Amino acid sequence: MSNNVYNLKKIPSMPERILSALAYLTFGTIGLVLMIVSVISKTSLKPFVRFNSYQAILIGFLFFFIQTTYLLIDSIFQLLGLIPFIGRFIYSFFQAVIYYLMGFPVCLGFSILATIVIATIVYLTILALMGKLPYIPYISNAIKGIIK
């Protein structure tokens, strides 16, 4: 996706870039505040900030959903762990898989999932600060469809 998606003929200003980067660093909280303020003040956000805000909010919801799903599945497997014989095996297997994904240090002491999250946020933040529209498959396409 290039900058002409929204017919941006010039590079976004530094405040726009900073607001977009902050939206990613706060998992969409700043973007949500910006959207609420723009609705209350009856002004529209610049396309660059609007795209990045929507994308940051969607990514924030996605990470929240992943974390909530993990907690729900963990609760279910703890209940299954109460079943004699097989339940303990199922719960132990689940704990091993989750430890590998969420607890086993892989890169600089971070787990696989944490490394992916940090790398994604760093990528999005750097591109937003550079004044480019960051592209994430499926998510960016969905945001593009929402905004148009």
Image (cartoon, helix red, strand yellow):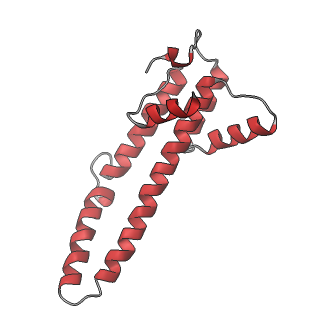
Q: Can residue 97 be seen in the rendering of this structure?
A: yes
| Residue closer to the observer: 90 or 13 | 90
Q: Can residue 110 be seen in the rendering of this structure?
A: no
Residue at image x 41%, y 62%?
A: 69
Give the image quarter of residue 117.
top left
Image position of 67 (left or right of 37): left
- Residue 67 in the image: x percent, y percent? 43, 59
Give the image quarter of residue 84.
bottom left
102 w.r.t. 18: above or below? below
Give the image quarter of residue 105.
bottom left
- Residue 130 in the image: x percent, y percent? 51, 20
| Residue closer to the observer: 111 or 136 | 136
Image quarter in which the C terminus is found: top right
Image quarter in which the N terminus is found: top left
Residue at image x 27%, y 70%?
A: 95
Residue at image x 45%, y 17%?
A: 2
| Residue closer to the observer: 84 or 108 | 84
- Residue 125 in the image: x percent, y percent? 50, 32
46 w.r.t. 105: above or below? above
Number of numbered discs on residues:
0
56 w.r.t. 77: above or below? above
